[in-house]
């Protein structure tokens, strides 16, 4: 009886912190957000009478996302907006930036797709003598931390300690776990100016006729092709705990002066305790470099690798090339503003 009265007094005093209040508030916020979006889209459709072209889209959903409810979330929140196909982007109601509101993320992503808001991302191309080219968006990993990551799932019975246990047992089997690598790389290439997507209007008919007659009567003499300058390759041998080759696409909005990839060499002077600590951090963020790691910006040709975007490949000598701004990913205006304000 006393426990029930205590719960009742707690609910009466702090009613705005209860589970029921949060559930009702969240449902009301989601409902209001959907109503605002749908109303804005219908209002613009009735006012502007824009001629809409039929578009087809193929949607790929991760079945494991949203705790197995990805299809339900998409059909409930994104599909209605896609069917309307009238995009104004006038979603005026903003939620807190650190909110984990999945509906807000789904609606923002859907609007960015229909409005065509994109950001360019670099791509890595990996070639070998025996395999077809492999492309990566994140990067390539080769070393001790990557090897331990593949064995973490074997210690599932240890719960939260499985990551530390995997690094500890790996250190018992072999220590130090250094890797010898040979790198050949080029210096960064100056980044060209962004091309305008809008096509300027062409000259009128009379100007085109005049230029064609001029080129026909006085053809321009083509200069002999210049010999390309020899590429200055730098060759170095390293002893490292792990080698990582990644793109600079962590912040695609940030303006860079040169097109380059980032080569990170983790020091091989770590102690066993530091190996476990840094390995636990890398299990959460594989592309995070160890403190005092050597970083090289290059347009590179590299040594042997095991992982390409977390996909395992046989170790062999490979050539890695950078394809700058090869792909364009959809990105909402809110996300672009957050990336522009970021420091990294």
Image (cartoon, rainbow, N blue to C red):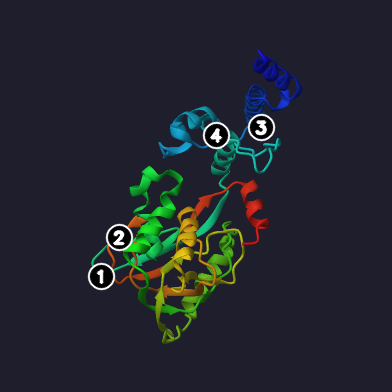
Residue 222 at x, y percent in the picture: 45, 83
- Image-based side of 248 in relation to 13, left or right: left
Distance from disc 1 to disc 4, alpha carbons, whole Å, reads 47 Å
Query: Which element is circle 4 on?
Result: loop
Name the front one of labels 2 and 3: 2
For label 1, the residue is 129
Q: Which mark is residue 313?
A: 2
Nearest the viewer among 106 and 143 is 143
Query: Which element is circle 2 on?
Result: loop
The disc, 1 or 3, on the residue closer to the chain's N-terminal end is 3
Callouts 2 and 4 close, C-beta under 8 Å: no
Name the front one of labels 1 and 2: 2
Callouts 1 and 3 close, C-beta under 8 Å: no
Residue 153 at x, y percent in the picture: 36, 48
Nearest the viewer among 281 and 41 is 281
Distance from disc 4 to disc 3, alpha carbons, whole Å, reads 11 Å
For label 4, the residue is 85
Q: Quadrant of the C terminus?
A: bottom right
The disc, 1 or 2, on the residue closer to the chain's N-terminal end is 1
Q: Which mark is residue 44?
A: 3
Name the front one of labels 1 and 4: 1
Name the front one of labels 1 and 3: 1
Distance from disc 2 to disc 4, alpha carbons, whole Å, reads 42 Å
Nearest the viewer among 62 and 191 is 62
The disc, 1 or 4, on the residue closer to the chain's N-terminal end is 4
| Residue furthest out toward the front | 2
């Amino acid at each position: 009886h006393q426990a029930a009265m205590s719960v009742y007094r707690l609910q009466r005093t702090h009613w705005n912190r209860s589970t029921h209040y949060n559930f009702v508030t969240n449902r009301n916020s989601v409902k209001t957000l959907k109503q605002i979006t749908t109303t804005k889209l219908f209002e613009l459709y009735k006012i502007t009478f824009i001629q809409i072209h039929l578009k087809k889209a193929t949607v790929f959903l991760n079945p494991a996302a949203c705790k197995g409810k990805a299809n339900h979330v998409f059909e409930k929140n994104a599909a209605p907006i896609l069917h309307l196909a009238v995009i104004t982007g006038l979603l005026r109601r903003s939620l807190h930036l650190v909110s984990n509101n999945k509906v807000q993320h789904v609606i923002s992503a859907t609007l960015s797709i229909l409005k065509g808001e994109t950001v360019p991302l670099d791509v890595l191309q990996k070639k070998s003598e025996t395999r077809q080219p492999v492309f990566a968006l994140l990067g390539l990993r080769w070393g001790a931390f990557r090897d331990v990551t593949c064995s973490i799932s074997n210690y599932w019975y240890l719960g939260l300690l499985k990551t530390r246990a995997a690094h500890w047992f790996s250190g018992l089997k072999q220590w130090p776990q250094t890797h010898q690598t040979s790198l050949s790389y080029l210096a960064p290439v100056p980044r060209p100016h962004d091309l305008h997507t809008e096509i300027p209007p062409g000259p009128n008919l009379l100007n085109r006729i005049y230029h064609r007659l001029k080129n026909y009567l006085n053809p321009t003499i083509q200069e002999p092709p210049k010999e390309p300058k020899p590429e200055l390759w730098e060759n170095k041998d390293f002893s490292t705990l792990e080698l990582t080759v990644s793109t600079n696409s962590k912040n695609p909005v940030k303006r860079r002066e040169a097109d380059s990839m980032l080569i990170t060499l983790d020091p091989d002077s770590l102690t066993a305790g530091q190996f476990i600590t840094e390995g636990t951090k890398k299990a959460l963020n594989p592309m995070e470099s160890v403190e005092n790691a050597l970083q090289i910006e290059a347009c590179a040709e590299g040594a042997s690798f095991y992982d390409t975007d977390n996909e395992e490949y046989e170790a062999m000598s490979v050539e890695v090339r950078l394809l700058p701004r090869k792909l364009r990913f959809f990105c909402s205006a809110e996300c672009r503003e957050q990336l522009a304000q970021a420091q990294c």
